Each structure stands twice: as structure tokens, then as C-alpha cells.
Image (spheres, grey):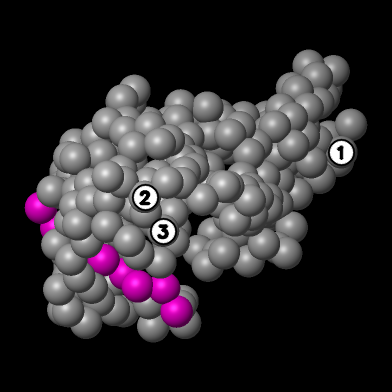
């Protein structure tokens, strides 16, 4: 997910030969809800996202978050796999009343 | 001493150059440090040692070419250090949710212009959301 328009996301998806869905949030609506809008973070002064990874379970609950204080650092693949494995290991929650 | 200095600095710069524009090649030498280390000490330390050796070499034996070489090493070392220790760090901010919170609702278009809606706390496939800075 990024503030890039769909065309830019499509080009990136093709270039990376990725199977992920690339969502566009050009106005930063979801970024504001999550508190991850980096104002004037792009070289041209546009707002972008603070790099963030969220793992969401089948109930829509956030189960794992990765953020760094530097834009270079990304979660290691094994960290992500561990978070997914922990998701599978969680006991089923009672249904909401 | 000067040869070792040049070797160290050149090796680090070569690793940086080789990873420039990398599209996620985990096996490329140095990639782990560049992408997964908060501060890539394994690249910075050889650079600093190389630069220090260059300065020590210059102090022992002066010369125009030697001075220019060590000056170039110092400039590169300063630029790389500035990038990794200051420029790439983000302003402080506070995430508006934490583990255990529901992901907020959204209605956003995907790369094909198809609207994707998701209501908070509704059943779904588990998913990993990666928010990235964009492609420019």
C-alpha cells in the first residue's frame, strides 16, 4: 500500500513480477487512521507512508507490527514468517456477542 | 598502509554500488546489512578503519597525490556515514494503533483501478499489509 496512483502501482507490480495486491491511498486516508503519514517525506515534498508492516488475522485484528526509525530497515523474512506462524498458533477467539 | 586503506574503502563503496537499485535480492553481498540492519555497522566500520589508515598514512608521508586520495576517501566516508547515521532516519511519530486493535475500515483502489473495501472487524483472509514509501 502506498500513495502512488494505480498506474504507478501496476508498473511496479509488473516490474517486481509480484502476486501481491497493490492498494493506492493517494489522499493518505488510511495513513491518517494509522498515524503513519510522513509529511513531505518524498523528495518533491509530497506526503508518503512511514514504512510499516501489519499482520491482520481473520477477524481483522492487528496481530503483529513492524516499524523502524529508519526508512532503510525492513522486517526480515523470518520475522514475518514467525509472526504468521504465531497467528496460526493462536487459540480461536470467542465470537462477538 | 595506504594500499590497505584504499582496499577497504573501495570494497565498501563497491558493495554499496552493487546494491544500488537492487530489487530485493537477499543473496546479494551486503544486502542484509543495507536492508535489515538498523545501522549497517559491518559496512561502516571497515569504511572508518580504511579512512583512518589513509589519514595515518598521510601523516607519515605527505604528498599531493596521497593527499588527494585520502581526501577523496574522507569525503566518501563522510557522505556514507551521514546517509546511514542521519539522513535515512525518520522523524519521530506515534502509531495510532497497537497489536490487538482492529485494522480500520478502508475503501481503496488496487493497481487495476478496482475498488477494494474492507470493514473493520469483519471476517476475512489473514493478510500482511506492507506500507511502503512509493516508487519514484
Tell me the number on the disc at residue B66: none
Q: Residue at x 31, y 79 (%)?
A: A11
| Residue B63 seen in the figure | no
Q: Do the residues labelled 3 and 1 touch (CB within 8 Å)?
A: no
Q: Quadrant of residue B5?
A: top right
- Magenta part of the protein: which range? A19-27
Name the residue rendered at 29%, 79% in the picture. A10
Magenta span: chief secondary structure: loop
Residue B88 position, x and y percent, is: 44, 36
Q: Earlier in the sequence, mark 3 or mark 2?
A: 3
Q: Which of marks 3 and 1 is in front?
A: 3
Residue lying furthest top in this view?
A: B59
* Depth check, front residue: B134 or B11: B134
Q: From the viewer's perspective, is B68 left or right of A57?
A: right
Which label sits on residue A58?
3
- Mark 3 to mark 1 CA distance (whole Å): 56 Å
| Element type at mark 2 | loop
Along the line of sight, which residue is nearer the eye, A56 or A59? A59
Q: Which chain carries label 2?
A: A
Q: How crowded is mark 1: few (under 14 residues within 10 Å), some or many (20 or more)?
A: some
Percent coordinates x, y for residue B96 in the rendering: 27, 31
SS under mark 1: helix
Q: Name the residue under label 1.
A: B4
Amino acid at each position: 500500500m502506498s500513495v502512488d496512483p494505480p498506474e504507478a502501482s501496476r508498473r511496479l507490480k509488473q516490474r517486481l513480477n509480484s502476486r501481491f495486491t497493490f492498494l493506492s491511498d493517494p489522499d493518505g486516508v488510511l495513513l491518517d487512521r494509522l498515524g503513519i503519514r510522513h509529511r513531505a517525506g518524498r523528495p518533491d515534498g509530497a506526503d508518503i507512508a512511514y514504512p510499516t508492516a501489519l499482520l491482520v488475522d481473520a477477524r481483522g485484528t492487528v496481530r503483529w507490527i513492524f516499524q523502524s526509525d529508519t526508512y532503510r530497515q525492513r522486517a526480515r523474512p523470518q520475522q514475518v514468517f514467525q509472526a504468521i506462524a504465531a497467528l496460526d498458533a493462536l487459540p480461536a477467539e470467542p465470537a462477538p456477542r | 598502509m595506504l594500499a590497505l586503506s584504499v582496499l577497504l574503502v573501495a570494497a565498501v563503496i563497491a558493495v554499496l554500488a552493487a546494491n544500488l537499485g537492487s530489487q530485493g535480492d537477499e543473496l546479494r553481498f551486503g544486502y542484509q546489512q543495507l536492508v535489515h540492519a538498523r545501522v549497517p555497522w559491518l559496512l561502516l566500520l571497515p569504511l572508518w578503519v580504511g579512512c583512518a589508515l589513509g589519514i595515518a598514512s598521510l601523516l607519515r608521508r605527505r604528498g599531493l597525490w596521497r593527499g588527494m586520495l585520502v581526501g577523496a576517501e574522507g569525503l566518501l566516508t563522510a557522505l556514507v556515514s551521514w546517509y546511514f547515521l542521519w539522513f535515512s532516519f525518520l522523524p519521530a511519530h506515534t502509531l495510532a494503533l497497537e497489536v490487538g486493535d482492529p485494522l480500520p475500515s478502508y475503501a481503496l483502489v488496487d493497481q487495476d483501478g478496482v475498488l477494494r473495501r474492507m470493514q473493520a472487524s469483519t471476517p476475512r483472509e489473514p493478510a500482511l499489509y506492507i506500507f511502503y514509501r512509493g516508487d519514484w
